[in-house]
Amino acid sequence: MFDERKLWKGRFNQRIKELSRYLRYIFNGHIMIVMVFLLGTAVFYYQQWLTTVPEQFPAAIIMAIALAFILTYTPIYTFLTEADRIFLLPLEIKLQWFFKRSIAVSFLLHAYLLIMGLAVFMPMYARVNDGNFQAFLPFLFAVLVMKGINLLIRWKVQYYVEKSVHIIDSFIRYAVNAVFLFFLFSNEGLLFLLPEMLLLFLLYFYYSKNTKEKGLKWEFLIEMEERRMTSFYRLANLFTDVPHLRDRVKRRSWLDWLFRRLAFAQKNTFSHLLVRTFLRAGDYFGLFVRLTIIGAAGIYFISFGYGQILLVLLFMYLTGFQLLPLWNHHQNKLWVKLYPLDERLKEQSFKKLLSKILYLQALILSLAVLAKGEWIIAIISLIAGIGLAYLFTRIYIKKKLYFE
């Protein structure tokens, strides 16, 4: 006999076990040291910045705009798989408890994000409100109530297949959430907060009425679940091999000029393959762009003196470390092993590509230092970055990738 409680418990335990296995690799070794360093640096400069914030600073507006994103972003983790569209579809009416539990677990996960987000902004709020931290718990209770309503609305919206409904719903809820949070952090009282809550309740009842005759959109729910897990697998793949990860290729025609710079020769076979993989497959190129932009912005806006050299080296190391899975990207493809080429050509091509990427990043990050007018530190950063790139590609990766 079908037992939905047993099914949900099995799915939930399986997902927790799978996430825990990969999280051990993500939060292991050097990456934890780097994260602690970055977090400590961010906290230090945040505290320094708070001492310069005037009492007229628009903290309520900033908090409302930022936290409204967390309130509006409400994915629901259903733990569904591809086979469920065949085997569970006939049992949809018996899965009410299953989906209620999924909504409850999703609420707890989002509540954690809200607590973290609110905790980050409370020092800024206290700075412009005479050091009042006592409002944290009332604020938290209010935003958790709003998060619960947003989750219920999101569940009903998922009964629609039209993308326009999803987009319009997100815009409406974000606007209502932002206004609610602004009045909340401005200490305006219940008279100003109740209308926004009433609007969301009306929106929920509207969707409930219009979805009574609709069935669950299994394809949509399964696709959303697979996308979330694929994003996690892609992150975990930066630290260990993930057999569940599916390759995704993006056509970036605006980068074709880079391919033309590679000579068409047998010795460049692996160079062509790796460059195309870096630019088009997975998230290697996006990772490089994001870390470079974040690093350049951090270096430019944070006055750290000679410590900026450490930031340059830190972001270069993060980039190089997270691009190492590029070496094994095609390890399960038989046709690559059929190339009549020496395996050492692949090693040389990989080292050459990775060194060029790190050299380019060293130049960009050093230019961010130079933009502040600190040309001596910029020159030292560039020299140190080139040195790190050389040592990383000649010594460090040999231990990591076991080059013969």
Image (cartoon, helix red, strand yellow):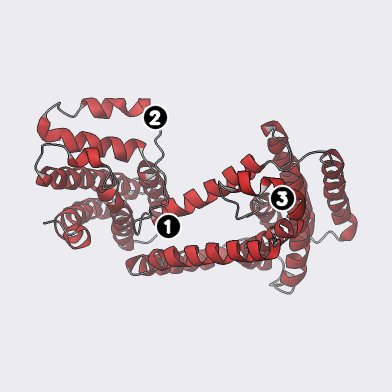
Residue with the mark numbered 2: 251
Give the x, y percent position of residue 217.
69, 41
Side of 144 where 274 appears, left or right: left
In the image, 113 versus 65, the foreground residue is 113
Circle nearer the N terminus (3, 2): 3
x and y, in percent, of residue 382 in the image: 23, 50
Q: CA distance from mark 3 to mark 2?
A: 40 Å
Q: Give the foreground label among 3 and 2.
A: 3
Q: Residue at x 30, y 52 (%)?
A: 325
C-alpha separation, residue under disc 3 versus residue under disc 1? 56 Å
Q: Mark 3 highlights which residue?
A: 91
Q: Is residue 311 left or right of residue 150?
A: left
Q: Residue furthest bottom?
A: 134
**Disc with the residue nearer the chain's start (1 vs 2):** 2
Give the crowd class for mark 2: few <14, some 14-19, many >=20 residues within 10 Å: few
> Helix or strand or loop: what does disc 2 sit on?
loop
Residue 182: in sight, yes or no?
no
